[in-house]
Image: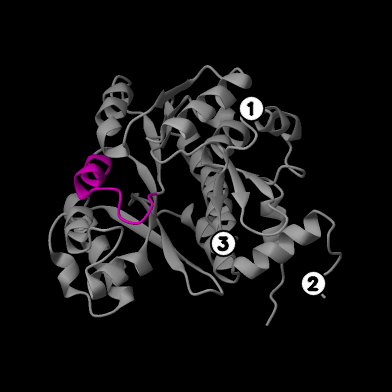
Amino acid sequence: MTTDLTWLKKQLKKIEETNSSFKEEINKIKETDPYICNEFHPWTPLKLVFLNYLLDVCAIVANNNYSKKNYIDVFAGSGLNKIKTKYEDILIGSPFIALLNHNTKFTKFFFCEKEKESFKTLEKRINKLNFKNFSLFNLDCNSCLDKILDEIKKDKFPYNFFFVDPFDLDFSWQSMKKLLNIRSDILLTFMSRASWRAVCTNEVTGHGYKALTTFFGDDSWKQAKCERDILEIYKKNILKERSDAVFYSVHINSVKGFAYNLLFITHKTGTGNPWMKPIINAGHEIEKHSDKAVEISLDIIKKRQNTLF
């Protein structure tokens, strides 16, 4: 059954190269190492849409309470994403979602990318647009986090938004604890299916149970009886470190059976977090759609197809 794509099309236009308000800037960064892009499947734009929407809401809320606001992206990539379809559509990646769509809302931007080629390309692309308020680290995210935290702690009571988008289980619990123990909002790509596969087979990116224990911080993952349990156990571990944590999770699914969750972690407020309502509404919109809906929406907004039918 096909769902209404109005909301999804509107959000995709904000990150797609030919419809973005920053077409000129995107063309400039495409000229830099034009063949270097992060290649992703058609469900990835759902994650980028949620990130972009979340930054809109969180930055507005933070603006009322903080003079210094930091955006931290610890798996930054090259800054451009190519979708693995016959059309190879280009979308801006998380660094340029933040730098272009939300530049005036944050005081400083921090990016970490361990792959040397992607790091060099991202650095050149950012410099091409003459941004000054950023720091870039060519390190593994677990290694560069202390450097970033030392920098942001120089300001008194800053707002910090962390985007943590690991491949499989590449973000250690020790690193997550560091984020939980400072005032921060966190968007984590939680690889639920990959984690459950590791529980069942002792195999994920060559590490299996060892990777799970590093990711969860202990062997609590052994309590999982099904895929859904994995995320709930992780959330319980978070509450041990941040007792006032408030969660919202968005389930991303594909017609090919790939699945993960976007886990947003914030703090409980005295007013009951009323600003979460638009975030929850956006999550509901995203959960209506799959990778197929993204492909159809891109076809329509790029005028390859006029309607759903």
Q: Identify residue for label 1.
A: 32
Residue located beneath label 2 in the image = 308
Which circle's residue, 2 or 1, is located before the other in the chain? 1
For the residues labelled 3 and 2, the Cα–Cα distance comes to 18 Å
As drawn, 116 above or below 46: above
Q: Amino acid at mark 1?
A: Thr
Q: Which residue is mark 3?
A: 43
Residue 25's place in the image compared with 188, above or below, is: above
Q: Residue furthest left?
A: 219
Work out which quarter of the rendered image holds the N terminus and state it: bottom right
**Residue at position x 65%, y 29% from top?**
29
Residue kind at label 2, given as amino acid type: Leu
* Spatial CA span between label 2 and label 1: 35 Å
Label 3 CA crowd tier, 10 Å (few <14, some 14–19, many 20+) = many
95 or 54: nearer the eye?
95
Dot 1 alpha-carbon crowd within 10 angstroms: few under 14, some 14 to 19, many 20 or more: some
180 falls in the magenta region: yes
Q: Secondary structure at mark 2?
A: loop
Q: Is residue 48 above or below residue 2?
A: above
Residue at image point 25% right, 73% down? 201
Image-based side of 303 in relation to 150, left or right: right
Q: Secondary structure at mark 3?
A: loop
Looking at the rendering, the stretch of residues picked out in magenta corresponds to: 166-181
- Mark 2, Cα crowd under 10 Å, few <14 / some 14-19 / many 20+, is few
| Three-letter amino acid code at the position of disc 3 | Trp
